Amino acid sequence: MQLSHPLSSSPHAQASLRHLQTGRLVLMLSGGSNAAKARPPVALTRTPFLLREKPSKATAPNFRAVSCAAAGVLCSQRVHRGRRTGLRAERDEAKARFVDWMRETGIVASPKVDIVPDAEGGRRVVCTAPIERGESLVRLPGSEAVSVAIDGDSVPEALAEWEELHMRGGAEALAEWWALHTRSSIRLAVVLASRYDQFEAYIDMLYPLEQICAPWRWEESDLQFLPPKMRRKVLARKAALQKACEDLERLKLGTPKDLFLRAHHAAASRAFAGEGNDSGRTAALAAGAISMAAFGAAAATGFASLDLAAAAGATIAAASGAVIASSKSQVLSLLPMIDLVNHQSGEPPDLQFDPGSRTWELKAKNSYKVGDEIVFSYGDKDSDSLLLQHGFVEEDNKADRLCVELPDAGSYGLSEEAAAQLGLAGLEELCFGRDGSLQVEVPRPALAEGVAAALRHAADGCKESEDDQVAASVSSPNVARVLLRWRQERRKMLAAAARRWKVNDLL
């Protein structure tokens, strides 16, 4: 049986000239019934790091507030329905452009998968025909990966080329910015934003700012509902991004703030990190967000050369919180289409890099039936990590754990003596497994007292009876949705720990 490719079903049947601007030609190609026919590659001019013009706005429209007081609820419903219809059309157009771009760049997706909207405004990759374990899902030419290399204290070799493009002071300004901002996700965001013309169709598939639910996008008043340790992490991320944006503007590097922030969310939540590995080409995942202090030499295109990893194969990991320690060359990469696959706790992806063909390939780790979502694990991440880094919370996360801070002595039933013993053990917080287990070396009576106090303290800030008030207090429905889900999962973990440690007043 011959399968039609769901990703080639585009509402646009003709190629149209999108715009012609000061030395840049951007061609928007839309597929139709003849989408499977070979097309010559579209030649795009090299885009300097300093963008001469701001790119088009994000895919999702920025709707203005509409007053419906005079027409009442009916008007409100019509406006909401109109917004949904307009957003759906924009998403369909963005998907059509992305599919055409994949075809032109040689990215091959299985005819058995499709990209569809999810219930929360995002996208997911689903199975449209039975898929067996080991089948190829996506093949991506290495040239279409957006990467930065991490190697000592060097700066991008691409600076020389950008200088040759007669960007007066551009190379020096970028070198200064690069030295100031060492987070690899922030650097990767600038690389992606600087290549807007080449990756416009991919960028348009990224979340618009208003749909990014990671806490660095929240209002500071929203953070009061997170524990102190999580608040500190969010504020540190906010400060780093604010400083990066201020320096981009101060140094006149020309990267639009909205574009940079959207690119950063992709880099922080969907990028892959890896290093050269003598054992071959198999992908392995690690937990946590990569935050490196040094950047390695990049290829002249502005992307890290995959030769850094290809000499002995590449081992990669989903971008997460822990630094990968190694003396070998490291890269942080966005892999278009592959990185549209969503997270589900469990097995890591079967993702390989073939040095011979210089191609990434994602294979099915499991068999799928029609309607199943294609998923893989971004790593063993608990609810706190998923919320902070990715902006979502997984229900009944198998990798979940509960970290709660110890309260001050004299509160929540924690005596001075028990607090002193816990302090001598260096404990400031307790981290429970999903079953409520706890691995610490502290005298049992003091530990039991500390556990009960810490759980009471955490439960006091996460009462179900206060959920409605919390939802009404935060800055947006999206924040309310993800925050309430996080509170729900936290209460499940609190209950498991309370049962394990027999904290009866919490049961």
Image (spheres, rainbow, N blue to C red):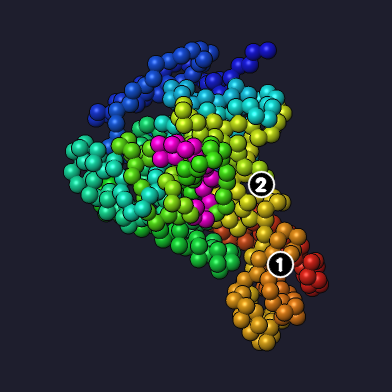
For the residue pair 356 and 410, the one nearer the viewer reads as 356
The residue sitting at the bottom extreme is 417
User: Which residue appears at 67% of the width and 56% of the height?
Assistant: 400
Q: Report crowding for label 2: few under 14, some 14 to 19, many 20 or more residues within 10 A (C-alpha).
A: many
Instruction: Tell me the quarter of the picture where residue 472 sits.
Output: bottom right
Dot 2 amino acid type: Ser
Say whether residue 74 is magenta.
no
For this view, does 474 lie left or right of residue 158?
right
Image coords of residue 120 (percent x, y)? 61, 42
Horizontal and vertical percent position of residue 252:
25, 49
Residue 308 sits inside the magenta stretch: yes
Q: What's the distance in space between the residues labelled 2 and 1, CA to CA?
A: 21 Å
Q: Secondary structure at mark 2?
A: loop
Vertical arrangement, residue 44 with respect to residue 314, above or below:
above
Tell me the quarter of the image containing the C terminus.
bottom right
Q: From the viewer's perspective, is residue 255 above or below residue 123?
A: below
User: Please, what secondary structure does the residue beneath circle 1 have?
Assistant: loop
Q: Where does residue 168 sit, x and y in percent of width and height?
A: 18, 43
Residue at 48% x, 54% y is: 325
Per the rendered image, the range of residues in magenta is: 307-324
Residue 137 in the image: state x and y as whole percent: 59, 28
Circle 1 sits on which residue?
438
Query: In this rendering, does residue 184 appear at all?
Result: yes
Residue that lies at the very extreme toward the front in this rendered image: 278
Report the residue marked by disc 2. 345
Number of numbered discs on residues: 2
In this picture, residue 94 sits left or right of residue 414: left
Q: Is residue 460 above or below residue 105?
A: below
Residue type for callout 1: Leu
Badge 2 or badge 1: first in the primary sequence:
2
